[in-house]
Amino acid sequence: MTAPPPPAALAPRPAETILWTDPQRAEVFRAWLTGIAAAQQLLPDTVRLASADASFRRYFRVDTGIAGTPTRIVMDAPPDKENSDPFVQVAELMAKAGVTAPQVLEWDRPNGFLLLDDLGRQTMLDVIDPARPDASRPLYDQAIDALIRWQLASQPGVLPPYDRALLERELALFPEWYIGRHRGVAIEGKLKERLERSFKLIVESNLASSSVYVHRDFMPRNLMVGHGSTLGVLDFQDAVYGPITYDIASLMRDAFLSWDEEFVLDITVRYWQAARKAGLPVDEDFGAFYRAVEWMGLQRHLKVAGIFARLTLRDGKPRYLADTPRFIAYIRATASRYMELTPLVRVIDEVEGTSPLTGFAYGRV
C-alpha cells in the first residue's frame, strides 16, 4: 500500500521556493548542496528555512537518508558580510572541551556555506517556565556543567582578547545608538561626563577578573535540549578570551527572560561553587565575585541595548528593540546598588524620564 502524502503544512519546501535576494548566490548554493548530497546522504529538494539571527547569517534544514539522523543544518553566511572562520575554530574548541556543539561536516569557505549537525528545534528557553524556578534548576545545572567544561579548556592566545579596547567599543554603542539615535538625546555636557566616568569604572572592574574562554551569548535561547544530560551550545562564533564573570552574567541576566533575585543568586552560587571545585579562577569570596558579575552584566546590558537599537534603526529588525526595557531595568537596578555608579543612574533617569530609585527590587521586569 502506498503511504499517503504528508499534509501540505508539513511538507518540506523545495530549494527553489526559498527566498533569495541574490539569484546568483542561490544558484551557487544549489550547486554546492547538490555536489555534496551523495557523500552526505542529503535530499536537496527538502531544504527549508530553519531560522535567521541578528546577523546576516541564515540557517536551513535539510533531510537526509541516514537512519537516526533525519536532518542536517546548512548555514548561509555571505563571505562579504560574515567571516565563517571563527565559527569553525570555536566549534572545534568546543568539541575538544567536551561541549556538545554542531560538528562542521562540510565547508565551502569561499562562498560561506557550512553543513552542520542538527541539534534539534527545542531551546532551553522553549521549555523553561518562568513561574516555576524550581523546575528549571536541572536545566541550569546542565548549563553550568557545559560552561565549566568550556572554561576549563581555556588557553591564552587562542581566541581574540576581550581587552579594554573591545570593552570600550561595545560600551560606546549605548550612547551612540540607544541614547543618541533611538532616544534623540544629545551626548554632551553633564550627561557625557557622567557616562564617561561610569564607563571607566565598569571597564576597570571587568578587567580585574581572571580570563577564560567566553562564549559571549551564553543564554537559554542558545542552549539546546534533548541531548541526555547535556545541553547543546549554539551561536558561539563571537567567542573571546576574557572575564570569567561574563558568561554567568549572560546566563542569569538574559535578553529574553528575567528571574527573581533569589533564583539568580541561587544559580550564581551553584556556578561559583562548581567553578571553585573545578579549580577555575573565581574569587574566593562570593560577595566579591557577585559584585564582579553584576558589573560585568552592566557592560553587557549597555552594549546589548545599543545593539538592539542599531538592529532596529540600521538593519530594519524592530523586534529586538521590544526587549530593551528589560535591559534598562537591569542597568538601573544594578547601578543603584553601588554609590559610585550614581552618575549612571542619573543618566538613565534623564534619558528614560524616570524618577530616582528610593529602594531596590530586582524582581521580574
Image (tube, rainbow, N blue to C red):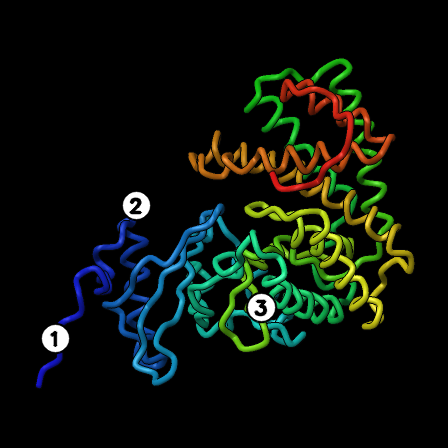
Image mark count: 3
Which residue position holds label 1?
A: 4
Q: Residue furthest right?
A: 284
In percent of width and height, residue 287 lies at 87, 51
Q: Residue furthest left?
A: 1
Give the residue number, with chain letter if any, for mark 3.
Answer: 91
Nearer to us in this view, 81 or 69? 69
Which of the two discs, 1 and 2, sits closer to the camera? 1
Mark 2 or 3, nearer chain start: 2
First in sequence: mark 1 vs mark 3: 1
Numbered disc in front, either 1 or 3: 1
Q: Give the crowd class for mark 2: few <14, some 14-19, many >=20 residues within 10 Å.
A: few
Q: Nearer the viewer, residue 88 or 257?
A: 257
Q: Which quadrant is the N terminus positioned in?
A: bottom left
* For marks 1 and 2 on the same chain, the one whose residue lies earlier in the sequence: 1
Tell me which amino acid carries mark 3: Ala
Query: Which residue is label 2 attached to?
Result: 21
Q: Residues within 10 Å of mark 3 (few under 14, many from 20)?
A: many
Cα gap from disc 1 to disc 2, whole angstroms: 35 Å
Hey, which residue is sitting farthest top in the picture?
Answer: 189
- Amino acid carrying mark 2 in the image: Thr
Judged left or right of residue 23, residue 217 is right
- Is label 1 in a helix, a strand or a loop? loop
Kind of residue at disc 1:
Pro
Q: What quarter of the picture does the C terminus occupy? A: top right
Element type at marker 3? Answer: helix
The image shows residue 141 at horizontal and vertical percentages of: 66, 67
Place of residue 158 in the rendered image (x, y in percent of width and height, measured from the top left): 72, 64
Q: Are marks 1 and 3 in contact (CB under 8 Å)?
A: no
User: Element under label 2?
Assistant: loop
Asked whether disc 2 touches disc 3, contact meaning CB atoms under 8 Å apart, the reply is no
Which residue is at a point 49% across and 61% down the rendered structure image?
127
